[in-house]
Image (tube, helix red, strand yellow):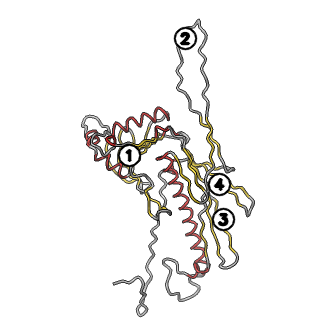
């Protein structure tokens, strides 16, 4: 029986190819946000919500009817900073890389320089992946809860999104999808109408948490709705998304594409993996809803430069003992649901 802690030395041993189980960040939500970089640390956005004016009747021998102009509101925000770092020390260079031979015949096969280059490349990818995964989590939190809670690292604040208060709801009792009396189809219809009314959009996408979708397809009224043989109201036809493996297309109902999204992130506080999508909620997104990812400027004190970029990588060497080479990939992202009326989120189980 193989023992991972014992290396036989009396017989030839060959090192097999290493396994790197890399959890590539899935950017199902982030891909819907347009990236905009800024040369400042804070950003202002003017949002004007037009009134659906209708011209009144007036006889041709009477004066025209004055019509008021619509005002606007200004939202301001300062994107929080992300600055994951990692260092390389002498001890790191002396350790074997995954897949590297345990015993080297020649010192020239894998020099410390090549080990350092490989380690730094892996570190860069890890740090960038961590930033992208945080962006995806920020987008998901904005869409499902209408806010972003920024806590830790000197931050303790909540950033509200410009979403109508009645577009973030929670069902209870007999209104839950799991209740026999509940009609999930009627809930989706009324939610779509809210998006049309407040967002001037037609809802085209519905994203379900795992528990929410299980309750949805198990609901008797949903089954009866889909079983109608004379009118094609919709269908459940699951298939995996070709771009984002964690996102599964489940079918279409009421003109909306249905998705489930099983993506996770490691929560440092609880030391557990958490779902990116709340398991008990369903999200509706309007077609072509305006959503933006704003990046604040990154200041480099060593160069005295203000950098208008989404990500800024740099490194430095610490003096003293022990010495180390540090790397950082800094970013300052902030997702904004500019057309907040095009979003609807409901807790349904």
Task: Please tell me whether mark 4 sits on a helix, a strand or a loop.
Answer: loop
Residue under circle 4? 309
Q: CA distance from mark 1 to mark 4?
A: 34 Å
Residue 277, position in %: x, y? 43, 52
Q: Residue furthest right?
A: 304
Badge 3 or badge 1: first in the primary sequence: 1
Distance of mark 3 from mark 1, alpha carbons?
Answer: 42 Å
Residue 90 placement (x, y as % from top left): 61, 80
Q: Residues within 10 Å of mark 4 (few under 14, many from 20)?
A: some
Q: Which residue is mark 1?
A: 258
Side (left or right) of 53 relative to 250: right
What residue is at 48 percent from the left and 78 percent from the top? 99
Q: Residues within 10 Å of mark 1 (few under 14, many from 20)?
A: many
Picture coordinates of residue 130 (x, y %)? 54, 61
Query: Which numbered circle lies on residue 314?
Result: 3
Query: From the viewer's perspective, is residue 35 above or below residue 90?
Result: above
> Which residue is the site of mark 2?
58
């Amino acid at each position: 029986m193989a023992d991972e802690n014992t290396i036989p030395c009396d017989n030839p041993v060959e090192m097999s190819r290493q396994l790197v189980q890399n959890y590539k960040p899935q950017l199902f939500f982030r891909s819907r946000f347009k990236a905009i970089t800024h040369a400042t640390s804070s950003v202002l956005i003017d949002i004007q919500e037009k009134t659906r004016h209708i011209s009144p009747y007036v006889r041709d021998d009477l004066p025209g009817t004055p019509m008021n102009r619509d005002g606007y509101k200004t939202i301001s925000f300062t994107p929080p900073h992300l600055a994951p770092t990692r260092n390389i020390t002498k001890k790191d260079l002396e350790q074997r890389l995954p897949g590297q031979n345990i015993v080297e015949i020649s010192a020239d096969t894998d020099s410390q320089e090549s080990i350092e280059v490989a380690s730094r490349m892996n570190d860069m990818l890890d740090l960038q992946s961590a930033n992208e995964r945080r962006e995806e989590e920020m987008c998901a939190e904005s869409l499902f809860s209408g806010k972003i809670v920024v806590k830790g690292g000197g931050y303790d604040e909540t950033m509200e999104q410009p979403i109508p208060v009645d577009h973030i709801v929670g069902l209870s009792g007999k209104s839950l999808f799991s209740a026999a009396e509940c009609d999930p189809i009627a809930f989706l219809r009324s939610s779509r109408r809210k998006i049309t009314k407040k967002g001037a959009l037609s809802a085209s996408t519905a994203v379900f948490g795992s528990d929410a979708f299980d309750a949805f397809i198990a609901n008797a009224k949903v089954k009866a709705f889909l079983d109608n043989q004379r009118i094609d109201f919709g269908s459940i036809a699951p298939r995996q998304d070709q771009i984002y493996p964690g996102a599964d297309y489940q079918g279409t109902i009421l003109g909306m594409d249905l998705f489930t999204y099983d993506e996770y992130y490691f929560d440092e506080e609880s030391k557990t993996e958490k779902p990116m999508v709340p398991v008990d909620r369903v999200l509706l997104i309007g077609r072509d809803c305006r959503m933006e990812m704003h990046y604040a400027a990154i200041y480099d004190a060593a160069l005295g430069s203000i950098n208008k970029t989404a990500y800024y990588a740099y490194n430095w060497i610490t003096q003293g003992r022990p010495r180390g080479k540090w790397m950082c990939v800094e970013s300052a992202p902030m997702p904004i649901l500019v057309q907040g009326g095009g979003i609807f989120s409901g807790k349904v189980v």
